[in-house]
Image (spheres, helix red, strand yellow):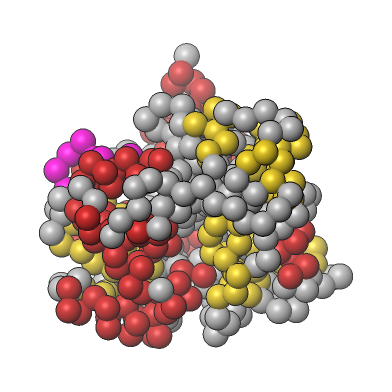
Amino acid sequence: MGVWTFKGGIHPPTRKFAKDTSIEKMPIPQKVRLFLAQNLGKPPKPTVEVGEEVKTGQKIAEADGFVSVPLHSPITGRIVEIKKQKHPVTSRPADVIVIEKTGDDDWKKLEPVKSYDQFTKEEILKRAQDAGLVGMGGATFPTHVKLSPSKKVDTLILNGAECEPYLTIDDRMMMEFPEEIVKGGLAFAKATGVKKIFIGIEENKPSAIDSMKRVCKPLGISVIKLPTKYPQGSEKHLIYAITKRIVPSGGLPMDVGVVVQNVSTARAMYRALEFGEPLIERGVTVTGEGVESPKNVIVRVGTPVSELLNFAKIKDETSRILLGGPMMGIAIDTLDVGIMKGTSGLTALTDNIVKKGTESNCIVCGMCVRACPMGLEPYLLYKLFKKKRFNDMNDNHLMDCIECGSCAYVCPSNIEHVKAFKTAKNVIRALRRR
Ligand code: SF4
Ligand code: SF4
């Protein structure tokens, strides 16, 4: 099959500080803050009012259509506020439900609860939506939608690449819960009817590779060791590395017969089936030079960022906090934000690590072109952006940009390509809607 990788990409320092730290359970927080918009597609509609008492796992917002999932209360408590707050992803005001803990962790689970392999294909799809499952690698696409491709698929890839520097939660999940991940993967395979299952893991996770191989071997599931290269975990690059199939421009994995699911999503699927647990908690890496004790934790969704940072002992010299890792993470300007279903990491950086330097003119060195894993010409796209030539950016395949940040990372002129490209994409989408 040749080398399990792709063209382009970069090798930033991995800084996986928490890779040898076992997963801990965070204490249940006194208060949670839940954005309704936790997933791609439509946000769910609230079904609760201020003052209402809720149990852990109780639905508090219902799916608004097919490309939407419900939201469940992560704690037992009382709804104390439904208000607007700036959403870290969109920077626009968005609805937030605030719940205060009132008592013990009294659960309301999904019914029926039975062995994961007793569910039919239809029941798995329904459970994925009822449990509010979304892609936990950060994409947050509703899981049941991904499991309902409109084209025939023959291959499932479980994504355990975790190529983003600093983050280690998927690595630890594969080390500590391989059986749960594989059982979730088998449920995904049943739901989609695929026979071939691969698990892609970067080679800098040898213990995770061993642990997954131990569980996978008797089941005929292939564990693929991939070179450590960013952005190896991007769906299109993972598919190419493992199957040599090329997802066409503007296309989806199903166009080449593949479904990709993150390993943590697979575990959540298993737990939703076997234990009736909706997605109310997730694994998060709290890391970076800005914390004293980098950690991997299982935490209730909605737990304030401030509590997680305190748990990992945030240092005074921290100057930037990112939801996610340093390449694709989103900088936040308040710690009053709750962890979301797609938050796999919290990275605290200090001034000496944050890239500094003012932007200067492009020197046409071509480094961004060599780094771009999508074969784009970032310097040209940026030039077009400066001239507001959005249609020309579109003609030069801007919409294929996966916003990986490789171009900005290598640029000697400190150009912030991704910021510009995100803006341009929004303009192009708005023009298309006209
Ligand atoms: S890496 Fe920066 S300076 Fe070099 S060609 Fe690209 S945009 Fe220009
Ligand atoms: S951010 Fe976009 S343009 Fe830049 S390297 Fe990644 S895919 Fe290419």
Residue at 17%, 73% (x, y): give it.
219
Residue at 61%, 80% (x, y): give it.
17
Q: Is residue 364 above or below residue 293?
A: above
Please state the horizontal and vertical placement of residue 370, each as a whole percent of the image.
42, 62
Q: Is residue 305 visible?
A: no
Please state the horizontal and vertical placement of residue 194, each as a whole percent of the image.
15, 54
Please state the horizontal and vertical placement of residue 238, each as a whole percent of the image.
32, 61
Q: Is residue 61 left or right of residue 175?
A: right
Asked where in the image residue 89 lies, by quadrant, the reply is top right
Q: Nearer the viewer, residue 17 or 214?
A: 214
Q: Is residue 286 left or right of residue 156?
A: right
Q: Is residue 137 above or below residue 93?
A: below
Q: Nearer the viewer, residue 358 or 88?
A: 88
Residue at 71%, 37% (x, y): give it.
79
Q: Is residue 166 left or right of residue 356?
A: left
Which quadrant does the N terminus fall into?
bottom left
Q: Which residues are magenta?
A: 143-153
